[in-house]
Amino acid sequence: MGYLGLAFLLLLILGLSLVQLIALALIDHRKRRGRLDRCLSSAGKKTKDVVSQPISLKAGEILRRMAAVTAERVSVVKGDEAETSAALLKSAGIRSRDAHLIYAFLKLVLPVAAVILSVLWLALNSEDGVKPLTAIVVVCATALVLSRAPDAVLSHKRKRRLEKVRRSFPDMLELLVITSEAGLAPVPALGRVAREVYAACPELAIELQQLVVELGVLPEREQAWRNLEERLPLPEVSVFANAMAQAGRYGTPFRGALRALMLDARAQRLLRLEEQAGRLPALMTIPLILFIMPALFIVLIGPAALSILDNLMNGGS
């Protein structure tokens, strides 16, 4: 009964915390809605919902409100961890305004949900004689796994995205060299290449389009190249951004830099293919040992083993 009492007490505390967060979100929403109604009524307007929103949009809006309220009340991600999570979201291709808030909200809610579910499971199976040490290990392990789940999902998404960009980056450089030799300036050449690369690699095309926009908006073009390097943390992109920034800073012809980068990208691709080909003998060792060697031993040793077995069964006659 002591274990069950502790479990229900923990559930009660977590439930009250969740109810408090929801209540604060509703109170803030009512306050904002009241201020908005007063402003519109003073101007002689009335707020009415002309078109009903879908349930998915309403659920997303509620989630964003709860995330915002949670971020205001509880500092879940801050300091170096906030910078790391922001860089992870950028490199994963997530640029939503509320992405960081939702990420912090999930980092807070998922461990709490894991603890609640684990305690409920242990409370329902307490009659089976679950040991306290086992219960503690299950609760802690579940909370730890779910707390690391957002990071694992983002890391997997980031890895896949960067791999796609790495495969298409040499082709993008070749197209950029062709357009620059045709007489286009750097910014129009980047815009043209972005439209051509979109069919093969939308991720790289979107980044190039954002780079073109930043080059035309930001007062310093080097900041646009630095932003590209942050969004795509790859060695190839870093070298490309540095070369283009130096070409713009010192006024050197960017066609020569692009041609050198293209040749280097071709050499890197060839080295990568040679590395993969060199790994094949080592990778083929495992199927050779598991599938080919047993069959070879059966063919070579099988007749002799059967002959010895027949002699032993027939008494050597």
Image (cartoon, rainbow, N blue to C red):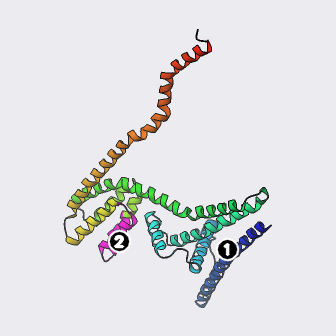
**Label 2: few (<14), some (14–19) or many (≥20) C-alpha neighbours in 10 Å:** some
In what quadrant of the picture does the N terminus appear? bottom right
Q: In the rendered structure, does residue 242 fall within the stretch colored magenta?
A: no
Disc 1 marks a residue whose amino acid type is: Leu
Q: Is residue 98 left or right of residue 207?
A: right
Q: Position of residue 169 (x, y in %)?
A: 34, 56
Point out residue 106 in the picture as x, y percentages from the top left corner. Answer: 58, 68
Q: Which mark is residue 18?
A: 1
Q: Which residues are magenta?
A: 208-234
User: Could you say where residue 13 lies in the image, as x and y percent from the top left?
Assistant: 71, 74
Amino acid on which the number 2 mark rests in the picture:
Glu
The quarter holding residue 170 reads: bottom left
Q: Which residue shows up at 63% across the image and 61% down it? A: 142
On the image, numbered disc 2 is attached to which residue? 214
Secondary element at tag 1: helix
- Residue 236 is situated, as x and y percent measured from the top left of the image, at 32, 59
